[in-house]
Image: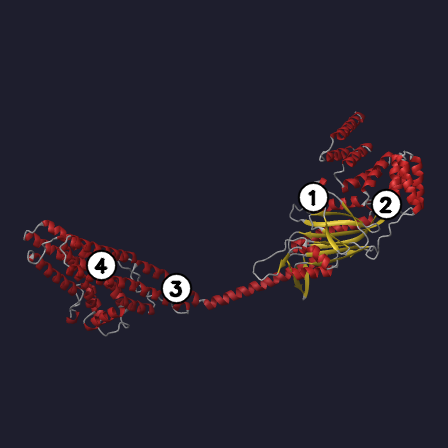
Amino acid sequence: MSQIFDQIFKFLHKSISYSFAIVFFSLQGAFFGAFYAYFFGSALIPDFTIANHPEIVNVFVFATLFAAIGHSIEFGILTPLGYGGLRQDLRKLNLFLKRNETIRHKDILELENNLNTLIHLPKENMYAAIRYAILVFVSVSITYLVFQYPLYELLLIFIGWLSAVFVYGGFSYIISDYATGSKRVEIKKILAYRDVSVHKNFGILSLKGKFIFLLILILLSLSVLSVFISFGNASLLKITAFITMTFIEAVILIYMFFQSINLTLEQINESANSLATGGSGALPILSIDKEFILFAENYEKATREVGKIRENLQELVEAKTAELRNSLETLETLKKQQDGDYFLTSLLIKPLSLNKTIGSHVKTDFLIKQKKTFLFHGRENEIGGDICITRTITLRGKDYTFFLNADAMGKSLQGAGGVLVLGAAVQSILERSNAVEAVKLLYAERWIKNAYQELHHIFESFDCSMLVSMVMGLIDDETGLMYYLNAEHPWSVLYRKGTAEFIKNNSDLRKLGTPFSEKSLEISTLQLLPGDVLILGSDGRDDIEFVTETTARKINHDEELFLRHVERGDGDLKSIYQSILTMGELTDDLSLMRIGFKENSHLPPRAIRKESYELMRKAKTQIKSEQLEEAKISLLEANRINPENREIKRALIRLLVRMKDYQLAAEKLNTYIEEYPGDTDLIYLASFTYKQTKEYGKAIDMGERIRLRNPGHLSNLIQLAQLYLLIGNLPKAEKTLHLTSLIPSDTKRIDQLKSQIESFRKNIVVEIPS
């Protein structure tokens, strides 16, 4: 259909004039308007015919013809005869758009003026249609008055005339808009080629207005048809004619409306493609609807910005390249400096993370794989927050293996900073332990307590900005008794006879640098057997990212997976590390420590000689019979025959305490505790025995060892408070008494102790000189 309209328009333009082509189509609106007016008159006025209203019909016909001729002359139907129209702008337009003549050579000002005329032409055409329609109605009204026809008929004709004006004016506007579109685009392209900014004037009707017009037109047609039928004076021929004409009119208008939108969208698409492929992206938009004009203005702004960017693209690229080059050079300089800082820090850490054990019974080894790696002077190094330290120290004449596995919180340099502080502090403590005689006389429990408190106070000064988890302890090189504490570090693993299990404890210790209560400080013990292997490790051993076929990350949450790695690696660090790597990738620093105790030795056969066994049985019988002196003689003889047997020594010591032979019991306890430091019950008995022999210093040492191992031992706390009272240390006694209040128990003994402390305080007050 578009080709039919285009061919008709081009033919009329070439044969007569451009304005005549517009008028030709616009007059169809006049025809449709008159058609509507006639049908309204026929429908509403039953006797409205040529026979009984000859004057009205004749005036209507002649006025309509006059209006059509006037409309045509005004818009240049006589242009071929040298008269371009009543309006000056239309005369210029008809002279400007001559047949078979190009407009590319026209002056810019002339092009702009005529473009403006074309933009306003649909509006002016609609106004002209309304004026001529008014002329027709005035002529008919005068005729009604002159010939004295009923005035109510004139009112009904006025209603029909309003519908005719609506159709005539709207049709004239839409047809003019559609018909002038191609010529507007042609002029806009010429102006755009000459770099002239095109004025974005828009028509009186927007897309919304046109749509409302079409909707009202359809509703109006249906209303006219319904009225026409309801009055009962319509023949089948008239109804068919009305439906046919309405259909033709609606199809023409709807087609032009949507075809205009379609052509405009095609223009936008072509301009966008042109802009995307490097063209100018000019948009000489066909439509004069407000919505499209506003879009064209914004689009033109965007194309200008794109044009500016393209013009300066090379300069921008060079400027950005130079900027990026400078940034890269700065970044490389900063990275070199950072890598230098990393390298210096790693050099400082290396002498702190040492394996310096010299004993033959306890063998240690460790493996550290920090997550952060860097290149410095062509060599790959690594830095992180994990550290391992082992060293042999001597306490009370016995060799102990000190071990520490720690993880400082934070990544890269932050974690390394924590390691530096921790490593330096630990090495200072170890050096002092080998140089200061007073430190060498400490028991293992007291040494670990002092070391932990010193480290905690150092990290506490950082206000929780530097935290360290760790497991730290001492191992008696001869007996294999391990004293240790765990400050929120992953559980250590005991690998014994091919089976791995966690060494769990109930410690409430938090990371170094976290505020803690002294009551939460508990030293745990574990008796190692020959052939046992301890595996310590940081949380990097568990933080494994599994390899999956999906893009989603899958992190290990099974802490017991590490036990299977230990068993699969048979307690060897390298094998354990390879087993971890087969499961996935490390996501954190990893440190592993291996401690083996007498791996080439075996437990001695636990045997008791026959004579000693008989004496033990005899002593038990004598004790039951309250023959304590005879039982003592039997046990002393059994101990002489088999001095290595632990059960005989325990039975003898308990009997001596029962007999209140505290002096001999103390002598036996001195030797026994050195040989079996893990026997907590006998250490408590030793504290009691030393109290009876008035060796209060030794008694307090034994009591403090028990308190560090088992802070909830109520009897030990009460006895310890009494010992402090005996030596006159009231603050210590009160502090120990306070610890008993944290343990649910019978308050009778505690109340007695409180009374003793109050009495002691009163005595002190009395003795103070005035």
Residue 674 is labelled as 2
Quarter-of-image position of residue 71: bottom left
User: Label 4 to label 1, Cα distance in Å?
Assistant: 89 Å
Q: State the SS at label 2.
A: helix
Q: Quadrant of residue 33?
A: bottom left
Residue at the extreme left of the image, as rendered: 147
Q: Residues within 10 Å of mark 3 (few under 14, many from 20)?
A: some
Q: Do labels 1 and 3 touch, CB within 8 Å?
A: no
Q: CA distance from mark 2 to mark 3?
A: 93 Å
Q: Secondary structure at mark 3?
A: helix
Give residue 304's mark: 3
Nearer the camera: disc 4 or disc 1 = 1
**Quarter-wise, where is residue 758 in the image?**
top right
Q: Earlier in the sequence, mark 2 or mark 3?
A: 3
Q: Is residue 41 left or right of residue 404?
A: left
Asked if residue 265 can be seen in this view, the reply is yes
Residue 469 screen position, x and y as percent: 69, 49
Circle 4 residue:
170
In this rendering, does residue 670 appear at all? no
Image quadrant containing the N terminus: bottom left
Q: Are marks 3 and 4 in contact (CB under 8 Å)?
A: no
Q: Which amino acid is tagged 1?
A: Asp
Q: Residue at x 87, y 44 (%)?
A: 647
| Classed neighbour count for the residue bearing mark 4: other residues with Cα under 10 Å, few (<14), some (14–19), many (≥20) | many
Hey, what amino acid is under mark 3? Arg
Measured along the vertical axis of the image, is residue 728 above or below residue 710? above
Residue of label 1:
508
Given residues 619 and 387, the one toward you in this image is 619
- Kindly report the distance in space between the C-alpha atoms of the residues bearing marks 3 and 4: 37 Å
Q: Amino acid at mark 4?
A: Gly
Q: Residue 371: horizontal and vertical position, in percent?
A: 66, 58
